[in-house]
Image: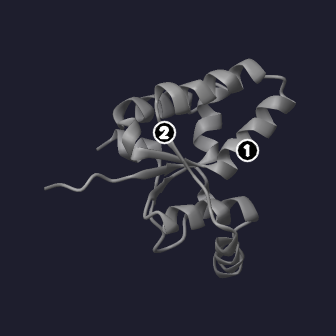
């Protein structure tokens, strides 16, 4: 029996699509290819997206996004416990991540997920990460 890969979708992936940036079509293909029960988002990513879209005065886009994720798509939001923040700090030191990258990485490790990202900061040997293009090419 084949085990389904489960993915933590990084903030930059969602924003690429929401802001219709250069790789928006790649993200769209990825999101259409992978069933929503294999996709996860961190609470930190949701909050970051909320901050960015509210600053850009795109509250309608944020509402549609939240509806698509949690009502229509039923994507699960994952969080870290307070004690897990010590792992976030350790990963900052270990990998040289900034706080948000370390948070995402720590969530992916805690829940045994592969991180989907465009962020080159995750190009560290041994990290389970993949880009949407790589998934689309499978």
CA distance for labels 2 and 1: 15 Å
Is 61 drawn above or below residue 138 in the view shown?
Answer: above
For residue 103, which numbered disc appears in the image?
none
In the image, residue 39 lies at what x, y percent?
A: 44, 44
Q: Dot 1: few (<14), some (14–19), or many (≥20) neighbours within 10 Å?
A: few
Q: In which quarter of the image is residue 3?
A: bottom left
**Placement of the C terminus among the 4 image quadrants:** top left
Identify residue for label 1: 47
Q: Position of residue 133 (x, y in %)?
A: 43, 42
Number of marks present in the image shown: 2
Q: Residue, x 82% and y 30% (percent of image)?
A: 54
Mark 2, Cα crowd under 10 Å, few <14 / some 14-19 / many 20+, is some
Residue at image location 49% in from the left, 47% down from the top: 40
User: Element under label 1?
Assistant: helix
Image quarter (top left, top right, bottom left or bottom right) of the N terminus: bottom left
Question: Would you name the residue on which mark 2 appears?
Answer: 75
Quarter of the image for residue 124 reads: bottom right
* Front in this rendered view, residue 34 or 42: 42
Residue closest to the eye, 88 or 98: 88
- Residue 122, position as x, y percentages in the image: 58, 63
């Amino acid at each position: 029996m084949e085990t389904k890969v489960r993915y933590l979708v990084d903030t930059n992936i969602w924003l690429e699509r929401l802001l219709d940036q250069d790789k928006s079509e790649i993200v769209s293909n990825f999101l259409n290819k992978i069933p929503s029960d294999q996709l996860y988002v961190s609470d930190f990513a949701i909050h970051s997206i909320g901050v960015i879209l509210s600053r850009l005065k795109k509250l309608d886009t944020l509402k549609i996004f939240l509806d698509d994720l949690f009502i229509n798509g039923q994507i699960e939001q994952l969080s870290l416990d307070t004690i897990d923040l010590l792992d976030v700090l350790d990963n900052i030191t270990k990998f040289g991540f900034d706080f948000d990258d370390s948070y995402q990485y720590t969530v992916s490790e805690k829940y045994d997920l592969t991180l989907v990202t465009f962020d080159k900061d995750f190009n560290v040997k041994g990290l389970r990460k993949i880009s949407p293009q790589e998934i689309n090419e499978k």
